[in-house]
Image (cartoon, rainbow, N blue to C red):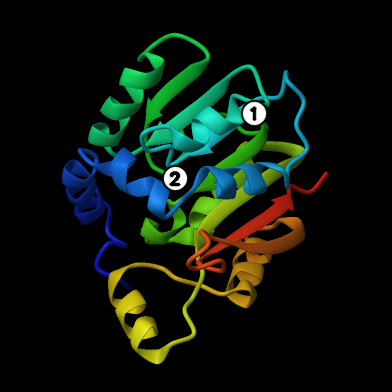
Amino acid sequence: MGLLENKARARLFYKYLSRVYDQVNPFIWTEEMRTEALSLLDFEAEMTVLDVGCGTGFATEGLLEHVDEVYALDQSEHQLEQAYEKFGKRAPPVHFHRGDAERLPFATDTFDVVWSSGSIEYWPEPILALREFRRVLKPGGQVLVVGPNYPDNVVSQLLADSIMLFYDEYEADKMFKTAGFDDVKHAFMGPSYDPDVAITTIGRAPK
């Protein structure tokens, strides 16, 4: 398990990163990547959507181009403070919650879409979190998770393993199917300098 696959250490990490997150993020998780990931989902404006690990709200902004309201959750109070400045804390179109991906504070069969980008790499128990995603999804609901693709270089692999969760499409396939998702598919994306840096997995909750 990597250094940041620990909730307390991840919160501490984002206590400081949140101050510059919106300046650093565009070099890693770009608007083009967000648009490409959004295109993998089928949206209708009235859908109920959950953004898990919403951070400062970068993906939330993209989701709001497709739906009227978004529920957004993060465990970092510092990341959420940045998001509040963009959207407000208590009023639509974003409903914020501070919470844990592995114990979502929502009822079963609540959402049409559960989205998570740049969060799975910090989860100590990713399959547990994915099962929570399936629980809160309506039957036939869509899931999309963007995470870091496992590098090919041996030195990079050692570094990646020491920091957080990196995984390939075979591991992603196993995780999502073990969590109970159907129609699991994967896409690779990234900025121009590293076009396969991220792996995006989509699937559906059983009907």
Q: Position of residue 48 (x, y in %)?
A: 65, 25
Q: Helix or strand or loop: what does disc 1 sit on?
A: loop
Is residue 134 in view? no
Task: Kindly report the distance in space between the C-alpha atoms of the residues bearing marks 1 and 2.
Answer: 15 Å
Query: Could you tell me which residue is drawn at 78 percent across and 37 percent down?
Result: 42
Toward the viewer: 162 or 36? Answer: 36
Residue type indicated by callout 2: Ala
Location of residue 103 (image quadrant) = top left
Location of residue 50 (image quadrant) = top right
Q: Helix or strand or loop: what does disc 2 sit on?
A: loop
**Position above or below: 157 against 118:** below
Toward the viewer: 201 or 112? Answer: 201
**Position above or below: 179 against 16:** below
Which mark, residue 101?
A: 2
- Report the residue that reaches farthest toward the front: 192
Is residue 185 in view? yes
Which mark, residue 110?
A: 1
Q: Position of residue 89 (x, y in %)?
A: 35, 15
Q: Position of residue 183 (x, y in %)?
A: 80, 58
